[in-house]
Amino acid sequence: MLRSRYEAVIVGGGHNGLVAAAYLARAGRRVLVLERLGHVGGLAVSARAFPGVDARLSRYSYLVSLLPSKVVADLGLKIALRRRRYASYTPVGETGLLVDNGDAARTAESFARVTGGDGELEAWRRFYGMTADVAERVAPTLLEPLADRAAMRNLVGEEAWRDLFERPVGEVVDERFADDTVRGVVLTDALIGTFADPSDPGLLANRCLLYHVIGDGTGDWNVPVGGMGAVSGALADAARAAGAEILTGAEVLAVDPSGEVAFRDADGEHAVTGERILANVPPAVLARLLGEAEPVPEGAQLKVNMVLSRLPRLRDPGVDPAAAFSGTFHINEGRDQLARAYAEASAGRIPSLPPAEVYCHSLTDPSILGPGLREAGAHTMTLFGLHMPARLFREDPAGAREAALRATLASMNAVLAEPVEDCLLRAPDGSPCLEAKTPVDLETEAGLPGGHIFHRDLSWPYGEPGRWGVETAFERVLLCGAGARRGGGVSGIPGHNAAMALLA
């Protein structure tokens, strides 16, 4: 039986809401989580996407970087995160650029072969040495009250402030690097989930880059053993163990700033009251629940999930496909290619050569495959396509999805030694194990306005001192989802910060 009053009612059972619930319940607060879907986790879930195929895919979000070790320790989360040995592989003609975290000499040889010397590698080391220093300094502040702009500038130092916080990252990359391929590899971190020109003075790409290089003080992008669902599952377990109530199949209908939350489940419509309401939903959704208007953001990615019967062959015989696909495999993401694709998408056209990147989770975590698939040499493959804004899919969602998928697979095949379609596993019904999700699909299926995976454009990690970046115009309503300041990605940071704001 639900109570009529709680100290905290959390709207949305995604990972951030579960983090907030766990912290608050452990502090002795009465907490209710209301989740629209029949399961918790939001976009951090694992799913058997293809009937009869024993593979648990991280269907939406797929890697972990920003989740702080402190949150894992505080909540006693039973999760394992594995570091990837290979950072990336980028095909270039008949060879490619391999960044091997376990073999500096091999990385140096690869840079020399692709770029013609050692200058780009030295520039690479200087640039990522700077970002590593920023990560070590900034990451701890993400779990503290906001610092102001001057304090953040003093913290990171003048060089990093100038090149990461003040100048467009496109200009910085063009200045620091000479090779088109290397420039593109750096810039992809500034464009994941973000539709932007990296040379735009609005610096949206800079904010995206920053969040991609500061995760947990290292910037590493790690693989959760068991898939993303293991992360959400551990958070739900921690929240329930602490006493939080989690109700799935409960669609919130309205939020009143006084603290009342109306929702509907299988038994009808109900209302509960919270001393505080924590909104683990996009700001545009919270505005709708409050009866207000909020501009809808625009997502810009194509997500393709696949199960392969085997790894594709590469054009470069000197690189094992298992190494190339163990890290981020870049597809037509040179600096000029990214700019061309952005221009085409801005003009309302699906890019003629869509930039994308792929990764095979099962090479790092084979546990997501059933025994039969492992023995047969099967693998999962996740593709993340850039510069695919929602506007391209509004008029004809299904037709545009198919066109974008065809163009993206053709782009991938252009850098492989064989078509990836030849490597797709077939489900028992004979269908290929491949699905594509556009921003419009995320809007429809996951309730993300505009299909924006960060809920809205990313913000700088500083602001009004003494606040947590979760506050809204209403004293009793806090924003604890990815749209909060210092939100975005699978981090739990907004959930932690909303809980701390309430407890304070």
Image (cartoon, helix red, strand yellow):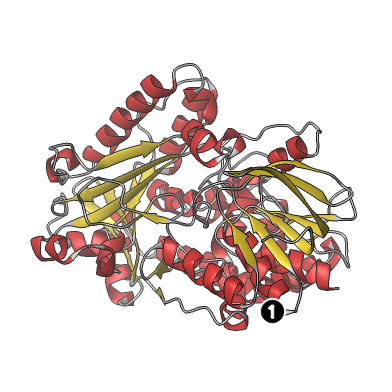
Neighbourhood count class around disc 1 (C-alpha, 10 Å): few under 14, some 14–19, many 20 upward: some
494 lies above or below 435: below
**Toward the viewer: 149 or 4?**
4
- Residue 364 screen position, x and y as percent: 29, 69
**Toward the viewer: 147 or 474?**
474
Dot 1 falls on a residue whose secondary structure is helix
**Toward the viewer: 77 or 117?**
77
Amino acid carrying label 1: it is Arg
321 lies above or below 257: below
- Residue 153 screen position, x and y as percent: 78, 66
Extreme residue toward the left, this view: 376
Left or right: 139, with 97 as reference point: right
**Toward the viewer: 270 or 472?**
270
Figure label count: 1
Left or right: 87, with 470 as reference point: left
Mark 1 lies on residue: 26
Q: Is residue 230 visible?
A: yes
- Residue 178 screen position, x and y as percent: 45, 51
Left or right: 56, with 470 as reference point: left
- Residue 497 screen position, x and y as percent: 74, 67
Give the position of the N terminus as an image quadrant: bottom right
Residue ID at (52%, 67%): 128
Q: Residue 106 appears in which quarter of the rendering?
A: bottom left
Q: Is residue 132 visible?
A: no
Residue ID at (37%, 20%): 399
Q: Residue 356 appears in which quarter of the rendering?
A: top left
Residue ID at (72%, 55%): 460
Q: Residue 241 appears in which quarter of the rendering?
A: bottom right
Give the position of the C terminus as an image quadrant: bottom right
